Image: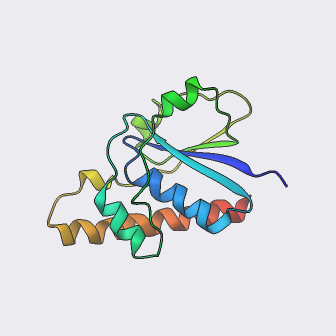
Amino acid sequence: MKKQKILFVCVHNSARSQMAEAFLNHLAADRFEAQSAGLEPGTLNPLAVAVMSELGLDISGNLTKDVFSMFKQGKVFNSVITVCDGANAERCPIFPGITKRLHWGFKDPAALAGTWEEKLATTRTIRDEIKAQVERFIAEQ
């Protein structure tokens, strides 16, 4: 069976899309090939690295990627899933081919306020929400 190619997109490709990519590749690598990218790629969020590490998933070596570069390269995906807010999701390019667009909105760890521990706790919640959504996606396919 040919793997479905899935692209997760958020603003900076620093946390939410990186976590979604890692979960899909970890939980269903036999059926899916996940990648992630950002509208304005930044640097990997240390909160995301920390909470994923707690589950044994190392994303510390991941690079942030530009969604518009992927678009210009003519990459084709079965599904493009935005994981940012709705307004930013609308900025995502329309990829060629038969691509299903989905939107899963999650809080942005980069926008959290508080101490490191407080932000870490909220990022864990976001991580768990992303994992649950990825599991639902796998079950529905």
Q: Position of residue 126 (x, y in %)?
A: 39, 63
Does residue 79 sit above or below 141 in this rendering? above
**Along the line of sight, the residue nearer the viewer: 74 or 120:** 74
Q: Position of residue 124 (x, y in %)?
A: 36, 70
The residue positioned farthest toward the right in the image shown: 1
Q: Name the side, left or right, on which 6 lies relative to 53.
A: right
Which corner quadrant of the image does residue 24 belong to? bottom right
Q: How is the image coloured?
A: rainbow
Tally of marks: 0
Residue for point 56% across, 23% down: 72
Does residue 103 sit above or below 114 in this rendering? above
Residue for point 38% across, 40% down: 11
Q: Position of residue 66 (x, y in %)?
A: 45, 34
Residue for point 44% across, 53% down: 62
**Along the line of sight, the residue nearer the viewer: 59 or 95:** 59
Quadrant of the snapshot with the C terminus? bottom right
Does residue 124 sit above or below 21 in this rendering? below
**Along the line of sight, the residue nearer the viewer: 83 or 117:** 117
Does residue 28 sit above or below 109 in this rendering? below
The residue positioned farthest toward the top in the image shown: 72
The residue positioned farthest toward the left in the image shown: 115
Residue for point 41% across, 44% down: 64
Quadrant of the snapshot with the N terminus? bottom right
Which corner quadrant of the image does residue 95 belong to? top right
Q: Position of residue 109 (x, y in %)?
A: 30, 56
